[in-house]
Image (cartoon, grey):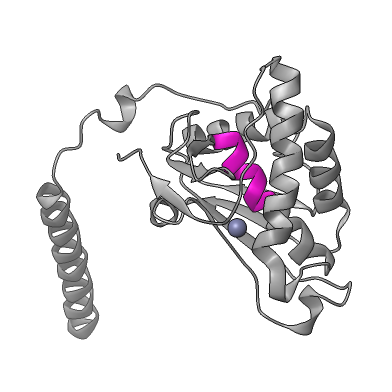
Amino acid sequence: MLIRFIIAIVVLMNVLVAAGASANSLSLVKATWPSDAERVRRNYRDTSQFLHSGYGFYLDGAPAQIAKISRWLDKIYQLPIGRQTIDAIMESQNRLIVRHSTYALVASGRTSAPVTRHLSDGVGEDVVILFDARIPDEGSHHVYDSHRQPIAFNALHNLFHELSHANHMLNGSWLYFDSEGQAIREENVFRRQLAEMLGLDKIELRVGQRGRQVWFP
Ligand SMILES: [Zn+2]
């Protein structure tokens, strides 16, 4: 009987110690502002057609970054070569992730995949595009025309260029020895179609892969 009583006391003491310890550790947590109770409750409705497109396309970032990349994708999709490229991406048997990344800024976007023969044999690989969603619509870089004059490389030119690389890697049509040439040729078709849609007199076409960063966060 006494033994039972002692066990009961020990168990009760353990419970009290545990409760005291958790009360202590709670009091050590810094107050956050605003508190959870004061936060605005939010739900999100996706209005871009690219957020739920099955296996083909994933956007990875905070809601504001995803919204910005989505808005650029929706615009790219309005042009024939943009539509053709995005449709081919979504129909590929591989997965594309477009991920917000501040590390992508210096290179104005990075597109990568495992380097295997599948990049060029029609099978393709999963692809990741790192893209900095902080850049303004005007873009972060200049590139150059045939007279070596700087021309715009706006966010749409830039993202389309990466989508062009991604499309060929996803579908196994990537040109190992001329991957930049392949993307720049398609970028120039995109430039022409965008300039025509906007009714611009001058169509700036890009020559060479060189670029210069002109926007800094
Ligand atoms: Zn490129």
- Left/right placement of residue 89 relative to residue 151 reads right
Name the residue nearer the viewer: 109 or 189: 189
Residue drawn at point x = 58 percent, y = 55 percent: 208
The residues colored magenta run 155-163
Depth order, front residue of 213/97:
213
Image quadrant in which you'd find residue 160 = top right
Between 51 and 68, the one lying in front of the other is 68
Residue at image point 74% right, 60% down: 95
Where residue 22 appears, x then y in whole percent? 19, 57
Residue at the limit of the structure toward the front, as seen here: 147
Q: In which quarter of the image is residue 66?
A: top right
Q: Check the image and report above or below for 130 versus 83.
A: below
Of the 4 image quadrants, the one containing the C terminus is: top left
Residue 2 is a magenta residue: no
Q: Which residue lies furthest to the top in this view?
A: 199
User: Would residue 31 appear left or right of 168 to someone viewing this image?
Assistant: left
Chief SS of the magenta region: helix
Relative image position of residue 170 (x, y in whole percent): 78, 63
> Does residue 165 appear in the picture of this structure?
yes
Residue at horizontal 86%, vertical 51%? 88
**Residue 142 position (above or below residue 107):** above
Image location (x, y in percent) of residue 150: 47, 39
Left or right, 154 with respect to 49, comes to: left
Give the image quarter of residue 3.
bottom left
Up/down of 178 relative to 188, above or below: below
Quarter containing the N terminus: bottom left
Q: Quick check: which quadrant has ligand 1?
A: bottom right
What residue is at 81 percent from the left and 46 percent from the top? 85
